[in-house]
Amino acid sequence: MNAKLAALSCLIGLAAVSPSSAQTYPSRPITMIVPFAAGGPTDVVGRLIAESMSEHLKAQVVVENVGGASGTVGAGRVARAEPDGYTVLLNNMSQVTAPLLYKQLPYDAINDFEPIGLVVDVAQTVVSKKGLPAKDLKELVAYVKANNVSLANAGRGSGSHLCGLLIKRATEATVNEVPYRGTGPAINDMLGGQVDVMCDQITNTSSHIRGKSIQAYCVTSKKRVPALAELPTCNEAGLPGFEASVWHGFYAPKGTPKDITAKLNEALQVALKNEKVKTRLSELGTEPVPTGDISPEALRNHLKMESEKWTSVISSAKIALE
Ligand code: MLT
């Protein structure tokens, strides 16, 4: 870069975070990074809220899927982005769980971000390809123990991986793990019969379960999910205490001015109160977070709590770092 260009980009950088730009924010499209593949559960939530946020902010919120390494590639992109409110991140619990399984990441999953708010809680479902000879969870456990099944996930430390890990631990079975850039492509392979078993967010599986194109065994939440009330919890179905729900959070890069994060928080609150968004999220089986939790403080506390919880699960499961 020549000196003139460097000076110019420095000025642009300063302008991006100056008070006057915060007042006029947003004056151009905002990129919402979803760090998993298109068509998957995180993508579905992202696109739903992006539409309503765009209306409220009067600027397009454009979803960009940057999948890979359990969401860490996309999260890393946001950590390094200009802190001007034009690059934001919607991530699921992988924000804190995936970094626990990598020796080195080029960013700090907690300190390199401004938390904006919790978005939604989502139960996972334990599912298999159609035709797998197991009609309930007990039979599935026996089948997994007796056969070297393939277990799909969205990478180490993702929600699907951690849930699969708990299944592996409960069954003490050897499975063949198949990582994807997100469970969107994983479910397509399950529909095609290429992978056997998976944990996946109900947002990605409910329509296939209702259409009987995959088999469902249980939901990983404490309580049954009204959208699929006939499906037992894993606890009821034979894995006592089994729980592995996923939550989603919304972030900006560290250093984003407070008045910009406040505008993003307001837009998130509006989106989550929007009737169309609420109805769709509930049809998909998600659980709304209490209004008070759509706040930076609540997300900050949640990150800390979840990081502690999964650190202990991961260390007791003795999973090697990558
Ligand atoms: C996960 O496994 O954490 C998610 O399902 C990833 C995704 O949104 O694809």
Image (cartoon, rainbow, N blue to C red):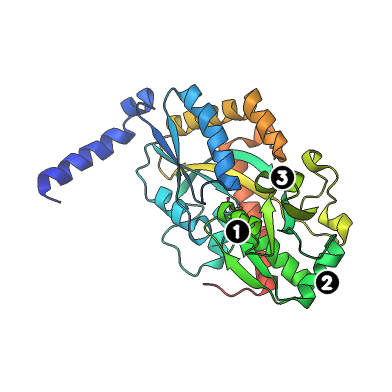
Looking at marks 1 and 2 on the same chain, the residue that comes earlier in the sequence is marked by 2
Q: What kind of residue is marked 2?
A: Ala
Left or right of 109 in this view: 159: right
Question: Disc 3 marks which residue?
Answer: 206
Whole-percent x, y for residue 64 in the image = 44, 43
Closest to the observer: 198 or 26? Answer: 198
* Numbered label attached to residue 189: 1
Residue 202 or residue 120, whichever sits in front: 202
- State how far apart marks 3 and 1 are (Cα): 16 Å
Numbered disc total? 3
Single out the mark in the foreground, 3 or 1: 1
Cα separation, mark 1 vs mark 2, equals: 23 Å
What's the residue type where badge 3 is placed?
Answer: Ser
Q: Residues within 10 Å of mark 2 (few under 14, many from 20)?
A: few
- Indicate yes or no: mark 1 CB to ligand 1 under 8 Å: no
Residue depicted at x 64% and y 25%: 276
Q: Secondary structure at mark 1?
A: helix
Residue that badge 2 annotates: 142
Please state if 28 lies on the left or on the right of 115 as rendered.
left
Q: Which of 171/157 is in front?
A: 171
